[in-house]
Amino acid sequence: MRYDSRPAPRGRARAAPPVTGRRPGHGAVGPSDAAPAPVAPPARRGRDARDARPLPHGPPPETRDGPAANRARPFVLISLHKPSAPPLDVEAILRPRMKKHDERRAANAARAAVLESQGAYHLSRELEACGQVVVFSICDDGQGGFDTRITGGLFCNRPRVCRICAARRTGRLVDSYWGKIAQCFIDDKDERLFPVMCVLTQSGGADVRERLEHLGDGLTRLLDRRRRALSASCVRNYSELTNVAGGVFSIEVKRGKGSRLWHVHPHGLFLQRDYMNAKRFGDEWADSIGQKRANVFLKRIGRGDKQTWLEGMPKELCEVFKYNVKLGDVADVESLDVFRAVSGKRLLRPFGILKGVHLQTDNEPAPFEGREFAVVAHDGEPVYEVVDYPPEETK
């Protein structure tokens, strides 16, 4: 099956050509006696609106040879090199990355089959085709090894339902906020900033959409309280977040281990100027979400030399941005409902000095230079092909 990424044409459907034949009830049955063709539904606005409800006209006309769960190809590499390029053992370098990539493709294929049975045909086809082509860049890390990074490919860009795109989203956010945090410490002339990791909790519930809206309203009240305290400092407008120069919240959705209720909570990273009172901050958060009590976890990170813990910041950022939806805890039959619940929601909340950071040229992410290889999964053949990218021009 070929994956066609072209969008469907908009506007009115073209009128069908006239057919010839006898009218109904006059002799032999002609072509005009056949059932009329179904009328295409009106085009919906927005990318996620295409999967808002099951399509009324059935699955796409392509035939499927087998269940989508078995369509992920096994891992075999065929390495082709340019004659002028130095030889690299691409199979050994890319095998760990492609093994993990192949596991994610298999999980996506199983989920795509369930989505197709639920009527989300467009989302199913996007999820199944995601990762069929991946472009890796390989360069020397300066320590006798190699660094690899994904620089292109065919992706569905649905990180809230796709494991491949969720991992890519985490990497992009870590790179972006690592540079922003470094810039904030460079601009800090008094050298008072220090990073703190934060986890806020709320009670679980059976409706994930309601829990998301409740948490979003609570974060809005919490940040509004901080803004009022900074603009008019008094006892009535007091907020512990005034000790925080800036930060970012990332909302996560997962199933509770024991209760099996939806546990929606934010992970955060603060750049603080002074220490906060954890008990007062917990009471402030509980008041924002309308609960008598709420748990708050605060942990200072990066003790010691600033250069040392700044180099280890990506590990802490991975903990903050690791996922929006914990796809491993969400059953395939529930993935469509969760996807519809989180679509259009604001799951990233930067504030303070981390909102709108202007990066200097020296602190922008450096380009990842190296030799690029395209990894292609062939339909119909259980083979991954690794070729130089872009291919050498033929004279």
Image (tube, rainbow, N blue to C red):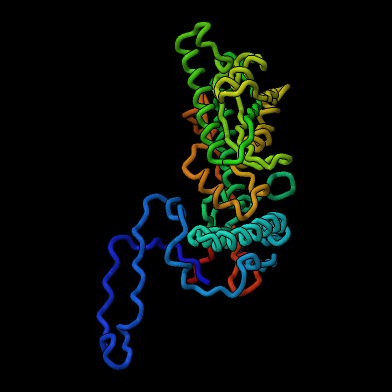
Nearer the observer, 95 or 214 = 214
Q: Which residue in the rendered view is the most extreme toward the top?
A: 234
| Residue 305 pos. (x, y %) | 71, 22
Q: Residue at x 43, y 51 (%)?
A: 49
Q: Is residue 166 above or below residue 236?
A: below
Q: Residue at x 50, y 13 (%)?
A: 229
Nearer the observer, 146 or 111 = 111
Q: Is residue 210 above or below residue 197?
A: below
| Residue 33 pos. (x, y %) | 32, 83
| Residue 54 pos. (x, y %) | 47, 59
Q: Is residue 79 above or below residue 280?
A: below
The part of the image, by quadrant, that contains residue 131 is bottom right
Q: Which residue in the rendered view is the most extreme toward the bottom?
A: 27
Figure label count: 0
Q: Residue at x 51, y 57 (%)?
A: 123
Nearer the observer, 233 or 365 = 233
The part of the image, by quadrant, that contains residue 70 is bottom right
| Residue 231 pos. (x, y %) | 45, 12
Q: Which residue in the rendered view is the most extreme toward the front?
A: 25
Q: Is residue 242 left or right of residue 97?
A: left
Residue 204 appears in the figure: yes
Nearer the observer, 309 or 271 = 271
Residue 133 appears in the figure: no
